[in-house]
Amino acid sequence: MRELIRGGIGRPPEIVTDRWQLVADLESLSALPPEADVIVPLELWRDEAARWADRPSGMGVLLNPDDDPLLLEPGVARLQVVAIAFPVFTDGRGYSLARLVRERLGFRGELRAVGDVQRDQIFYLLRCGFDAFALGAGKQLDEALGAFEDFTEAYQAGADQPIPLYRRRLLGMPFHGPRS
């Protein structure tokens, strides 16, 4: 089975086995047992909304870079996973999608980055609200865990820290500060 990194926003990072099946169409879905946890593309999720209501297992949705995440709004509370695709390393639209899903839709489940995800992106993905990372083929998960220690502090507010550093300093709130 495939492994991924899960952690961030209050949870230490760890390598875990991925129990979720990415399903592209209804034919592939019918080949799986009904208790399988599945992630389906947004279009399939919307077209087959009645099918998901009675599903006994976990439900997730895959957002591609050109999908409108606000279409998740009617059923976002029933989702356990929202996966956001990064088809190529240089496509940054997934960062914006993540912020919309976390902040506008209030999604509190697992927000997963999938596709051409690389170690160098993990800190920035965390800032946008991701808490699971399915790295691209051939990437070393053990090595990627080090990305959680690359930076101790960020100046700007983000999904992982809603108060910017300057305001935390003014309010006398604790912060990590630079590494020694």
Image: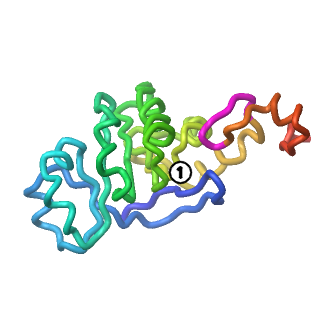
Q: Is the magenta stretch mostly helix, strand or loop?
A: loop
Quick check: 148 above or below 127? below
Name the quadrant containing residue 42. top left
Residue 39 image offset from top left, x and y in percent? 28, 55
**What residue lies at 10% left-to-right and 55% top-to-bottom?**
26
The residue shown at (86%, 45%) is 174
| In this rendering, position of residue 180 left or right of residue 21 | right
Question: Mark 1 sits on what residue?
Answer: 131
**Horizontal arrangement in the rendering, residue 75 relative to residue 92 (left or right):** left
Which residue, as the protein is rendered here, is positioned at the far front? Answer: 74
Quadrant of the image occupied by residue 52: bottom left
Residue at the (28%, 38%) spot, across then down: 71
Query: Which residue, as the protein is rendered here, is positioned at the far left?
Result: 27
Question: Per the image, is 179 magenta?
Answer: no
Q: In which quarter of the image is the C terminus?
A: top right
- The magenta-colored residue range is 154-160
Q: Looking at the picture, which amino acid does disc 1 mark?
A: Asp
